[in-house]
Amino acid sequence: MPCSIYDPELDIVKIDTKKEHNPLISVCFEPTNRCQGMCPYCLIERHKPDIALDKAITYVDLLNQLGTRRIGWGGGEPLLFPGIYDLGTYARGLNMGSLLRTSGTFTIDASEAISAFDWVDVSLDSIDPNVFSQCRPGVSFEKLIYNIVSLSPILRVRVSILLTSVNKNSLFETIKWASATGVRCVRIQTLVPRGRAKSRYGQLSVDPSIEHKLIEEAINYAESLSLPCYELKSVSKGLIAILKPNGDIYSGDPAGIVKLGNLEDDQISILIANALGDSHRSHYAIGQ
Ligand code: SF4
């Protein structure tokens, strides 16, 4: 039996370091790689077919057996996967945490979302529509705003900001709006030279001499508004993974990913343990 416990209020998995045998506690499951967006820094390089819903359910069972206590539903755009609410509800029925990570471009069904997700994470790179359209071409700003405003009073909503040279000047304005709207948390992530960003990294990334200070100031600003805010770093390394629609598992780290194996491999728990080891274990892991 898994010894780790998911705390939905804080969105962390508490780990019993003495008893825990499996480090794969938080997984980003991507049931689809499809997306209508054309973001210049998208990490999806090759599009794989969607997983079938019944197969996805068996994968959730396998993850549960491996000790996974939290699943973030990613993609692509996970709302394009027809069974996404069923998957979330199923995972929560197994006492796993469930978090939807969406571009927000489709209307989220609030009544289904309440059953399916502990948290909804929406990528809002900027509250300025002109800046946003440069960051996330193909994503509907109006729908995204509607989703955040309508869901925030009834569900835990997190806003994710990918910091680039394009949106850095609207960072504080975006945090202020999130706070006023009842968003529960803001996550800031820096650009990595992977996927579509590989060839545009120099142009899109923030000057390293100011990036760290800017994030620190943004976190302090959010805290002054009583809004929890953190930077996604590799603090969870060794405890998280990405599951692709074809069952391939990669160790997740903002700096890079490495394939561990396939979930249907009988030896997967040994492969994961060997690949990740125990060295990165901590008492909790905040999710991706
Ligand atoms: S919304 Fe996300 S998955 Fe879609 S293109 Fe943009 S970064 Fe990629």
Image (cartoon, rainbow, N blue to C red):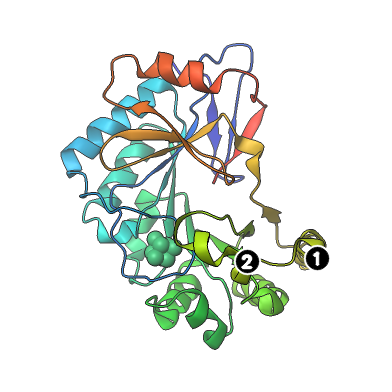
- Could you say whether the residue bearing mark 2 is in a helix, strand or loop? helix
Image point (68%, 53%), residue name: 231
Q: Nearer the viewer, residue 136 or 175?
A: 136
Does residue 147 show up? yes
Ligand 1 shows up in the quarter that is bottom left
Q: Would you name the residue on which mark 1 appears?
A: 210
Q: Nearer the viewer, residue 2 or 250?
A: 250
Closest to the observer: 181 or 196? 196
Residue kind at label 1, given as amino acid type = Ile
- Whole-percent x and y of residue 194? 50, 54
Q: Locate residue 195 relative to residue 125 in the image: left or right.
A: left
Mark 1 or mark 2, which is nearer the start of the sequence? 2
Give x and y (percent) for residue 286: 61, 41
Decide: is 207 above or below 242: below
Whether 115 is drawn above or below 175: the answer is above
Q: Position of residue 183 (x, y in %)?
A: 59, 66
Query: Which of the 4 image quadrants contains residue 169?
Result: bottom right
Number of other residues with Cα within 10 Å of mark 2, as a class: few under 14, some 14 to 19, many 20 or more? few
On whether ligand 1 comes within 8 Å of the CB at mark 1, the answer is no
- Where 193 falls versus 277 (above or below)? below
Towards the viewer: 216 or 274:
274
Say whether residue 152 is left or right of residue 86. right
Quarter the N terminus occupies: top left
- Label for residue 202? 2
Q: Measure the alpha-carbon separation of dots 2 and 1.
A: 15 Å
- Helix, strand or loop at mark 1: helix
